[in-house]
Amino acid sequence: MDKEKRTEIGTLGEFGLIDQINKQVQLKQASSLKGIGDDAAVLGPSDKLRVVTTDMLLEGVHFDLSYTPLKHLGFKAIAVNVSDVAAMNAIPTQVTVSLGLSNRFSVEAVEELYEGINLAANHYNLDLVGGDTTSSRAGLIIAVTAIGEVGEEEISYRSGARQNDIVCATGDLGGAFVGLQVLEREKQVFLSDPKMQPQLDKYPYITGRQLRPDARMDIIHELRELKVVPTSMMDISDGLASELFHICKASGVGVAIYEDKLPIDKQTYDTALEFNLDPITCVLNGGEDYELLFTINQKDFKLLEKHPDIHFIGHVTAAGDGKVLVTKSGSAVPLKAQGWQHF
Ligand SMILES: [Mg+2]
């Protein structure tokens, strides 16, 4: 937060603040007929299906401002919603952002948050078309709703996985969870001795994974170009194992995942060991990577085979075969899902 200048929100008022926010917004999508500035946003008709998703981020539950820059937080709030739009194989078009602000937050702090929000809106080519700001008694609340579009033939539900489909995961996994361990440790060091500065330089990749995740719209656009429609898809927000359980349940199938195929970054692996964590457990149960988990029909394998960032981690089995992890030694152990419990 900018310590040089602090303008109380009260001096601008809610309408002044909205004007301030609106100044930064330029509509890009043809379907955004009216954005901020009337009683409701107006979206034009579409010959596609529309997907709607919403997510709420609460200070102290989902983020800690002692190590989260507001600009990153603004970006992340949009990215996690875009990730859910991506998980339907849809393209995001609009978002609304609502904030609950305590009097701790100045106009400058809100501007910093919106800097990240606008950066994400440009990055994902979507429009900020509305929202609300209200005062909160304690802490910051960010509620985002995202809208996206997808052709009827292209939508991917959780329920479409079929026996013998190939299970794919993008990027690498576990980094955001291990990055969070680093941030929490450095915070404790700082709390016990404020003269100690956080040592984050050693862990740029994994702390970045935690603080500023990027939704995999690049993969969605590539799948579209290749005309590959995943038979089922989810984004990996609660951990790979947990998401696999959701797909298996919705599709009525089982799954076999191979330990030696699981994608993990070297920094994630090394740092997990430093924290006495099992790297594979971090990959399976760490959350917030915002990568994509999807299944494809075997006929599409050739099209994706050479993709550097799509990993083929297993296959779909019959429901009766259960959900198993095949270890490096070749034994099949039951997969355990322990997702993120916020409550
Ligand atoms: Mg999701």
Image (spheres, grey):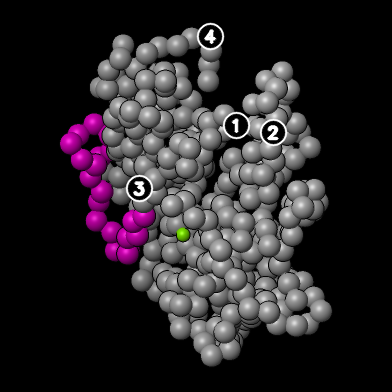
For label 4, the SS is loop
Q: Is 37 inside the magenta-drawn segment?
A: yes
Q: Nearer the viewer, mark 3 or mark 1?
A: 1
Q: Which mark is residue 67?
A: 1
Q: Earlier in the sequence, mark 3 or mark 2?
A: 3
**Callout 4 amino acid:** Glu
Label 3 and label 2: CA atoms lie apart by 33 Å
Q: Which mark is residue 4?
A: 4
**Cβ–Cβ below 8 Å for labels 3 and 1?**
no
For label 3, the SS is strand
Percent position of residue 106, x then y: 41, 18
Give the camera-side residue of 273 and 134: 273
- Label 3 belongs to which residue? 145
Residue for point 54% across, 66% down: 242
Q: Is residue 317 above or below residue 113?
A: below
For label 2, the SS is helix
Q: Quadrant of residue 139?
A: top left
**Cβ–Cβ below 8 Å for labels 4 and 1?**
no
- Label 2 belongs to which residue? 186
**Callout 1 amino acid:** Tyr
Q: Is residue 305 above or below residue 134?
A: below
Label 3 and label 1: CA atoms lie apart by 25 Å
Percent position of residue 133, x then y: 30, 30
Q: How many marks?
A: 4
